[in-house]
């Protein structure tokens, strides 16, 4: 059982971002993460990428993200703060 599933099963309420791993290559950062979307009661595991201060990936894309809008925005803010971007 992964961390997000465990916290969810223990009654954790709210969206949660768990960084699994990341790799820095020049100005880019590739981030593997899991996101617990409270609004859907689902966990999503995907990769996003920073190129300088811009973040890319379906998980954070305004039209392609499977996350609820609030969770998507929280995820973006968390990642920008975590990686100081």
Image (cartoon, helix red, strand yellow):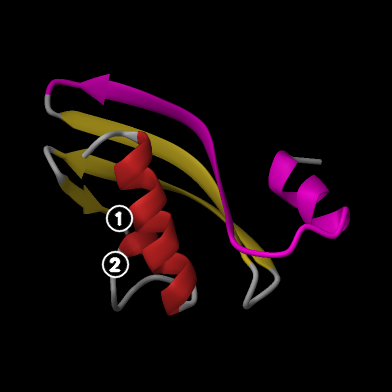
Relative height, residue 83 to residue 75 (above, below): above
Residue 48 seen from this side: no
Relative height, residue 2 to residue 60 (above, below): above
Q: According to the image, label 1 marks what residue?
A: 57
Residue furthest toward the right? 10
Residue ID at (34%, 62%): 60
- Segment tinted magenta in the rendering: 3-26
Q: Position of residue 45 (x, y in %)?
A: 54, 50
Q: In screen coordinates, is 37 left or right of 41?
A: left
Q: According to the image, label 2 marks what residue?
A: 61
Q: Is residue 19 magenta?
A: yes
**Residue 77: quadrant of the picture:** bottom left
State yes or no: discs 1 and 2 in contact (Cβ < 8 Å): yes
Residue ID at (41%, 49%): 78
Quadrant where the C terminus is found in the figure: top left
Distance, label 1 to label 2, CA atoms, is 6 Å
Q: Position of residue 2 (x, y in %)?
A: 74, 40
Residue ID at (73%, 64%): 13
Q: In screen coordinates, is 66 left or right of 50?
A: right
Residue ID at (27%, 22%): 24
User: Which class describes the residues within 10 Å of circle 2: few (<14), some (14-19), or many (20+)?
Assistant: some
């Amino acid at each position: 059982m992964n961390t997000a599933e465990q916290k969810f099963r223990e009654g954790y309420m709210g969206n949660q971002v768990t960084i699994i791993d990341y790799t820095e290559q020049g100005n880019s950062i590739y981030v593997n993460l899991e996101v617990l979307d409270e609004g859907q009661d689902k966990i999503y595991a995907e990769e996003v990428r920073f190129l300088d201060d811009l973040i890319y990936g379906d998980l954070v894309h305004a039209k392609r993200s499977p996350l609820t809008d609030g969770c998507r925005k929280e995820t973006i803010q968390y990642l920008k703060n975590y990686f100081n971007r």
